[in-house]
Amino acid sequence: PETETEIKLCELWQSLLQQERVGINNNFFELGGHSLLAMRLITQVMQVFNVDIAVKDIFESPVLKDMAQLIDNASISEQSLITVQPESEIGYPLSYSQKRLWFIDKLEGGSVNYNVAASYRYRNGINVQALEFALNEVVKRHQVLRTSYHEHGDDVLQRVAEFEPLKLDVVDVSSLSPATRDEEVARILKRNAHTLFDLEQGPIFASQLIHVANDEYILALTIHHIACDGWSFGILEQELTDYYQACEAQINITKSELPIQYRDFAAWQGEPAQLARLTLDEKYWENRLAAMPELHSLPLDKARPKVQTFNGQRHIATIN
C-alpha cells in the first residue's frame, strides 16, 4: 500500500479477514470474505473514511487497490452518515430486516423458528455474581435487547424500554444421576432455545445457567433474530467475556458509549438518500426480470407440505 487510503484499508482487511499481511492486489473474496463480512466492511469504511459504499461496490471492486480508488472517488454526503435519533415516546421506525421478521412472526402467530440460541460450557467453575453483572451490562449497553415492537396506525414502531436489572436464573441438576442429568440438561437447553418471545411485550432475550456437576456449568442464551444475528452474537460474546473478567478481577471497566444504536441505523435506512438508492435497485431488478415467465416449474425432490415445518437433519461426513 502506498496511499493513506490503501494503508488504512489494508489494516481493515487484515483485522476483518484475520490475515497477517494484505497487499493492494489481493481480492477480498479470495481471502475469505463473504456477504456478512462485506456488511461489516461497509460499516468500518463508513467509520474510518466517512464514506458510504454499497455491497454491490465490494462485489464490483473486490481488489484492494480498486476499492481504495472507489473510496477516494466517493462523495462525502451528510445524508449518508447515521445520526442519533432524538428521544421519542411514540417510537422509532423498523429496519427492513426487522419489518420482515415482525411480519413473519405475525403471519405464523408467534414462532420459535427465528430464535438465535447458544450455550457455553464452563468446566472450571463460574462466578455467578460476575456473570449476572456481565449480562446486565450488555443489556444496558445495547438498546436492541430492550426493544419491543408495536403497531402504530398502518405502521410498526420499535420502543426502547428503560433498563431494569435482570436476575440470572440458576438451575441445579448436579444431584441427578449421570444419565438422568444428561437428559435433563438436553431438555433444559431445548426448552431455552424454543422460548416463545412476545415481540410486543418483550423481553426478547432469555438466559439461564445450569449447574451440571461440581465446577461444571452451562450458560444458555436465546435471542430473537429481530434483535440479533450471527455477527452481533459474536459481539455479545466478547463483551460478556470482557465484563465478566473485569468483575471477577474487581477491575472497573469503562467501555466507550456506543455512537449509535440499532434504532438510529433503522431510521437512516428510511432517509431520502437511502430510499433513492433502493429505488435504483428495484428498477435494476425489474428490468433484469422483465422477461421472466410468471410461473416456474422448478424441479423438486419431493412434494412440499402445505405448512412449512422447518424440520431438519444433520449429516456428518469426513473428507480425506
Image: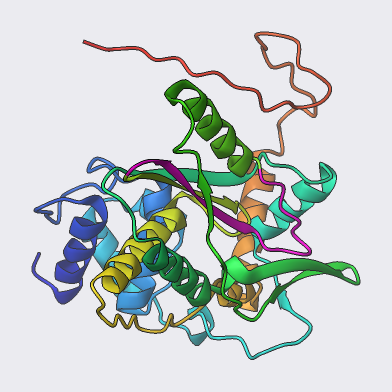
In the image, taking residue 210 as reference, residue 123 lies left or right, namely left
The residue furthest right is 153
Q: Which residue is drawn at 91% across and 72% down?
A: 153
In the image, taking residue 265 as reference, residue 134 lies left or right, namely left
Indicate whether 269 appears above or below 24: below
Q: Residue at x 82, y 50 (%)?
A: 106
Residue 175 in picture, x, y percent from top left: 46, 36
Q: Which residue is drawn at 26% across and 12% down?
A: 319
Q: In which quarter of the image is residue 133?
A: bottom left
Residues drawn in magenta: 195-214
Asked if residue 292 lies in the magenta stretch, the reply is: no
Q: Which of 73 and 156 is in front in this view?
A: 156
Q: Residue at x 33, y 66 (%)?
A: 244
In the image, taking residue 240 as reference, residue 78 lies left or right, namely right
Residue 209 in picture, x, y percent from top left: 48, 51
Q: How many labels does the image show?
A: 0
Residue 134 in picture, x, y percent from top left: 41, 68
In the image, taking residue 173 as reference, residue 274 lies left or right, namely right
Indicate whether 295 appears above or below 262: above
Residue 284 in picture, x, y percent from top left: 62, 51
